[in-house]
Amino acid sequence: MHKHVEWDDPGADSVMRHFQQDNSGHSEPGPGDILSARHEGAVVRVKVEAYVDGTSIGDVAAIIAVDNGRRLKSHGKLALGDTVRLPDACRALEPTLGDPDDRDQDG
């Protein structure tokens, strides 16, 4: 049984919008693929087990805080290992994680 998740709108980071502009290299997700989405502001990675009618079904493989890149065991009602459904429309490109002042800078 999968856990119902209200995914965040991917907005400008929409994977589907990206591939509308450049379809090269795009294929349907398959078993073992890792997809990303946003949930309550965190990045969620889902390891795909099946793909049916524009929706990936799989387990939560990682939950990452966007502000500092820290890996979380849970976020809200979502936890590592939960089985979820991820519609293509909710898939998101991953943002640059963490505080820009914490990253190495040249110079």
Image: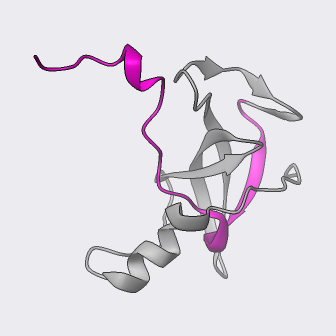
Residue drawn at 42 percent across, 38 percent down: 96
- Quarter of the image where one finds residue 59: top right
Q: Where residue 10 sits: x, y (%)?
A: 62, 61
- Residue 24 sits above or below residue 103 on the image: below
- Quarter of the image where one finds residue 64: top right
Residue 96 falls inside the magenta stretch:
yes
How many numbered marks does the figure carry? 0
Q: Tell me if I can see residue 22 in this picture.
A: yes
Residue drawn at 42 percent across, 85 percent down: 20
User: In the figure, is residue 57 to the left or right of 95?
Assistant: right
Residue 58 falls inside the magenta stretch:
no
Residue reaching furthest to the front: 107
Q: Where residue 89 sits: x, y (%)?
A: 64, 73
Q: Where residue 99 sits: x, y (%)?
A: 47, 23
Q: Tell me if I can see residue 55 in this picture.
A: no
User: In the figure, is residue 97 to the left or right of 2?
Assistant: left
Span shown in magenta: 80-107
Residue reaching furthest to the left: 107
Residue drawn at 59 percent across, 62 percent down: 91
| Magenta span main SS | loop
Residue drawn at 86 percent across, 32 percent down: 76
